[in-house]
Image (cartoon, rainbow, N blue to C red):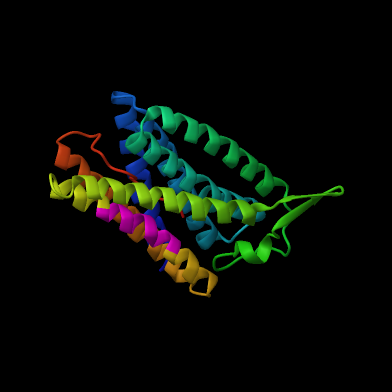
Amino acid sequence: MDVVLSTVAALVASAFAVELGRSALRRPRLHAQVWAVAMTLYAAATWALVVGLAFGWSAIGFRVFYLFGAIANIPFLAAGSVALVLGERSGRRFALAVTGFVAAGAIAVLIAPLESPVAKVGIPEGSELYAFGIEVGSVTLPGPRVFAVISGAVGTLVLVGLALVSTVRAWRTNRRLAAGNLLIVLGAVAPATGGSLTALGEGAALALSLLVGAVLLYGGYRVAASARGRPHAEVAAPARGA
């Protein structure tokens, strides 16, 4: 069942990424471009989950899943929200900072030793495989878990906060737009909830939460976009990572 749920979630995320990419090509705007990148990362992490569940996990597969799902996509989603709600100038600065952060996180994921062999079945836990620090000579550098914690805490705060700001702005004048943003808030929270349950041993929850998150995010984006009658409605965050 986990494989089926994860596959459907990956298909929904991929369709959403393609739609965002086409929209960004038709009408280049920073928030749409950044969201297209973020949703592609969401889809890539979900496909990595599908492969791991269906064929067994490898060290490389887990690193891809962890980097794209736990570190990379949430900050890019937040950057897209900043660009839309606070303006492209702020969005570009935030996106540049995010790019540096994700690049550092990618290096940490690539060089960090695994504390134990990756389990072939189920969903491997980053807390069991990665330490908080990486020893490089006599220097201790932040490990992948540090980047994941920062990504989840700061990225989610910005993502949900700006979505709520957009909801409040639209509540009196455009209830449909406000409803779309509320769906996006729920979609942003769903994968984080699944990740928490996974840490408690409920592996099936992650696959389901990714599917629920992708559907709510895609649906919220469509509802908010239709409220403005064009593909670039004031949507604070069209997607969230695994």
Q: Position of residue 84 (x, y in %)?
A: 33, 35
Residue 238 appears in the picture as rendered: yes
Residue at 58%, 61% in the rendered image: 56
Residue lying at the far right of the rendered structure: 138
Residue 8 appears in the picture as rendered: no
Q: Position of residue 110 (x, y in %)?
A: 68, 46
Q: Does the magenta stretch include residue 44?
A: no
Residue nearest the observer in this picture, 37 or 59:
37
Residue 59 against residue 34 in the figure, above or below: below
Residue 204 against residue 219 in the figure, above or below: below
Residue at 60%, 55% in the rendered image: 62
Residue at 32%, 55% in the rendered image: 185
Residue nearest the observer in this picture, 162 or 227:
162
Residue at 73%, 55% in the rendered image: 133
Left or right of 21 on screen, residue 227: left
Q: How many labels does the image show?
A: 0
Residue nearest the observer in this picture, 228 or 199:
228
Q: Magenta segment, principal secondary structure? A: helix
Left or right of 160 on screen, residue 115: right
Left or right of 131 on screen, residue 202: left
Residue lying at the far bottom of the rendered structure: 201
Q: Quadrant of residue 97?
A: top right
Q: Position of residue 193 (x, y in %)?
A: 43, 65
Residue 28 against residue 98 in the figure, above or below: above
What's the magenta region?
182-192
Residue 220 against residue 95 in the figure, above or below: below
The image quadrant where one finds the N terminus is: bottom left
